[in-house]
Amino acid sequence: MTKRFMLGVVGVVLLCGAGTASAVENVKINGYASFGATYLDMPEKGKEHGLQAWDSFIPGKFSTDPDIRAALQFAAKINEKLDFNAQLFGRPTEDEFKAHLDWVYLSYHLTPQVDVRVGRNKTPLFLLSDYIDVGYAYPWVRPPQEVYSSSIIESLNGVEIYYKNKFGGWRGIAQVYFGSNADETTVPQEQLTSLPTPGTLGDITPTEFSVYGAKGVNLSLSSDILTLRAGYFNAEVDAEDFSAVTDNVTLVTAGASLNWNNLVVYTELFQRDSEANINRLFPNQKGHYATFGYRFGKILPYVTTAKLSDNGNPVGADYGTPLTQKSTAFGVRFEMGDGADLKFEVQNIKPGEGSRGLFVTDPRTMTEPQNDANLYSIVMDVVF
């Protein structure tokens, strides 16, 4: 662990436990971690030829970095009405293990059903948004990228109103949130879709952007076996490199999950619309996936099909070019006792015609042309 990570841990613990000894006793700490390895089978190997995952880069060779991550979560009850929550999250980078406060907020219990949260929260866009890094919580090695890569921002600084209630055998949740985030980076999708000279990488450079006036709603209804959810997100985005000033981005999502006897099903879809110059960073896209699994004791084999498509994006030099691809994944999850699992997954990924998909380098531009690539992954997840 780096000094930065340890200082972060100490800082959060002191913040949670500041005050009397009785306050320290109210602090709860838990965490999770994942450790894995990937091999991306492409004709040309090297870290330049890889895959853009939703929160990391998978190089075109054997690697242990993409699926290694760890976090500590802190919860402190300040008084009967006020709670403090934070998560310190870390993962490897090229030269060190970096950690940061992924979310940190105060929660005021307005009524038994309504909380008001102030601070930094995960943006609730998908089924897994609240626990997207907790690998133990879902069947895959990583969530399907054809949907989860569509989010322009993972966390927002602002205010969230969280409502929960029970309706017979159903549990309902409604979240309304407002916020901003002025310190984000992304790889422009227009750069990822312009095919370079065969065997070259092209000009792939991350760019900075800021999100202001973000607002959204997340609705969820669940029983013991079924969860249904829908969400809406809208924000104004600035990106100086693309002359984008308060350009509008809208994301609409929906999903469902089923855990009935031994049957496991997940499915989600999204549609994104972007106006003016910000379309060059975030073109109009749509996508979906479906996962089907069947549990045999401690073993859960599953299959996932997914597709990322154009969503009627305007054509021209002033607009971005949507990414397109489809994939099929076969995997097995094995329960290793309480709080631990081991997963194996093989994914075949095929970019759409004229697109790199989520690859940095299109397999079809290389000296040994092929129209797809295979990603082999193994990961162990733990919660504690």
Image (cartoon, rainbow, N blue to C red):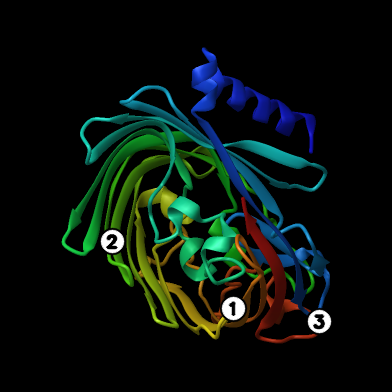
Residue at label 2? Answer: 230
Mark earlier in primary sequence (3, 2): 2
Q: Report the amino acid beneath label 3.
A: Thr
Left or right of residue 278, residue 144 in this image: right
Per the rendering, the mark at residue 298 is 1
Marker count (numbered): 3
Write the residue at 44% across / 51% down.
Answer: 130
In terms of depth relative to the viewer, which is nearer, 313 or 103? Answer: 103
Rounded to the nearest whole Å, what is the CA distance between mark 1 and mark 2? 31 Å
Per the rendering, the mark at residue 367 is 3
Q: Residue furthest top?
A: 19
Q: Is residue 281 visible?
A: no
Write the residue at 38% across / 66% down.
Answer: 313
Mark earlier in primary sequence (1, 2): 2
Left or right of residue 52, residue 226 in this image: left
Rounded to the nearest whole Å, what is the CA distance between mark 3 and mark 2? 44 Å
Q: Is residue 346 visible?
A: yes
Rounded to the nearest whole Å, what is the CA distance between mark 1 and mark 3? 44 Å
Quadrant, the N terminus:
top right
